[in-house]
Structure formats: C-alpha cells, structure tokens
Image (cartoon, grey):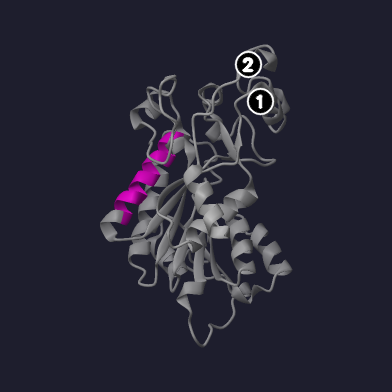
Amino acid sequence: MSPAAEIPLLIHEEEEEEDFSKRVCVMDASGRLGSSLVESLLQRNYIVHAAVSTYGNLQPLKGIANCLNNKNLKIFETDPFDYESIINALKDCSALFYSFETPQEQPIFDELMAEIEVRAAHNVLEACAQTDTMEKVIFTSSITAVIWREDHKSTTADQLSERDWSDVNFCKKFKLWHGLSKTLAEKTAWALAMDRGVNMVSINAGLLVGPEISMKTSYLKGAAEMYEDGVLVTVDLKFLVDAHICVFEDISSYGRYLCFNHVINQPDDAVEFAKMLTPSTATTTLSAATSYEDLGIFEQRIGNKKLNKLMVDYKN
C-alpha cells in the first residue's frame, strides 16, 4: 500500500456539500491520545481524517469503527517523513490535532529521536501551511519542553508557566532526550507556524498515566529531580482529550497551554505513583531513599491556570 493511500474499508462517498469547519484530521490516530480524540470528535459529529503512521497500530480505530456510526470516519495511512501522504490526509480539513508517536523500531528516546521528531514536525507544519482550508493546528507537546534548565532547583525561582522553555544544552548535558526532542520539535513547529501564518496552539502535557508506563518511559528520565522540584505532574486521558477539544473549539485560545491534573510532590503521592510502575523498579522511582517516608513534601512549582480558566469559561 502506498503511504499516501486511503484505507478503503471505512471510506464512504464524499458528502454533496462540504462543510470544511466540521472536517478535522488527527495525527497520529493510532496512539492512546489520538484514538481517543478520534472517538470524541466523532461523537461531536465531526468528519474525522484519522491519519495512522505506517508503523502505527490500526486496532484501536477498528474498535471505534465497529462501535460508532463510522460514516464520518476516514482512515489514511501516512508517514510523517512522506510529505505527500500528509498533504493527502489533510485535504479539506479545517484543523489538525498532531501528536508524535515513537516508531516501534525505536521505542526508546535517544539522541537521534530529536532529529526524527523535528523532521516530522517540520513536514507536518509545512503541509498545514499548504492546506487552504486549514484554520487551526493543535500541537501536542510535553511538560518536559518546559521544566529543564540550569536553575531548576532554585528555591527562589518563580512558578513555571507557558512562558518557560527547557534549555537545550542542559537537556543534552544530562541526556534528557525526551525533553530535548519535545523542546526542539515544538520550537520548530512554532517557528514554521509564525513564518507561514498558521494558527497554532500547543498543549504541553504532563505524563499520560496508564497501564503501559514504567520507569523505562522516556518522560521519566530525571523523575527524582522532577519530584524534588515540584514539577512531576501527570494527566488523565479524559482530561487531556477534553483540553484538546476545548482549545480547538474556543476561538479565543492562543499560544501554549500546560496540561495536567495531578501533582506528585509528597510521599503519599509518590507511593501511589510507584504502584503504577513496574514493580521491580518502583522502589527506585523517585529517590534512592530506603522508604518513601524519607521523601519530603515539596512546593508545587508549575501552574496551569491558563488552561483551567479557558476550560471553565468554555464550559460556561
């Protein structure tokens, strides 16, 4: 199958009258966030172009297609490094929800992942700029693109917010590859969006909790430091999906939004968090201390008031 090919089994004839404002693209639609966004958007009567990477898993979307009326679901096989396949998936769409899923053959972030993710972000934003119907891009980034810098342990530092960026050299120095990749990819996307006149909003998400996370999860490199700095935050899938829908539909949304709904900054939180991780590594999750009672309580040093206000105003 050509990378730009549209998967035929779930495709229906085009509507006689196009309403581009109700046609959106989700990329990569094969991950937890992507497939959940697809389901939520379909429930809101959007026509969804579900862009699945060539190394993605189609199973979540098959389940959605079987459970919902799928006349509005169109699945495309895309490669973030094949520009034409991206253009094909974006055709006639008014918005793109973009998140980067790690290739299966390279599941662990390393020094090469930054280059891969930057190239993907560049291709996607360039394709958005060439899509005449495109009105908004919702770019999923990470809290790790915000928290890492030389003065991250400073007790006098202000609370981190959307204005902050991780320091690239600091990430390289301590091999914080997830932070490096997310920082460089998001900065690439913002630079292109501003240069090409693309309306973009980014969501910098905390660690997405779920059964698949473990201490091998690339986000958690430096977890002990995050805990002590008061910036170890997680987000539930439903909250993350709702945030994406909110910043998409609210015409007043702009810039970056930090997205999390749990802060892990005291021993009880650490114990609960450790239970979600691989048992054999759970005891070393946040500290070399012999027990979680040895961990202190640290002041939260990151805020998401901007997103919370937007979501409250939107619901009202």
Real-space Cα distance between discs 1 and 2?
Answer: 9 Å
Secondary element at tag 1: helix
Q: Residue at x 40, y 39 (%)?
A: 183
Q: Amino acid at mark 1?
A: Ala
Q: Is residue 171 magenta?
A: no
- Classify residue 37 by image quadrant: bottom right
Pointer 1: what residue?
270
Residue 300, horizontal then vertical, whole percent: 53, 28
Q: Residue at x 61, y 68 (%)?
A: 44
Q: Residue at x 60, y 22 (%)?
A: 286
Above-or-below relation of 57 to 14: above
**Residue 177 appears in the picture as rendered:** yes
Above-or-below relation of 7 to 272: below
Above-or-below relation of 198 to 143: below
Residue 190, horizontal then vertical, whole percent: 34, 50
Residue 151, horizontal then vertical, whole percent: 38, 22
What range is drawn magenta here?
179-193
Pointer 2: what residue?
295
Q: Are marks 1 and 2 in contact (CB under 8 Å)?
A: yes
In the rendered structure, which disc, 1 or 2, sits on the residue that comes first in sequence?
Answer: 1
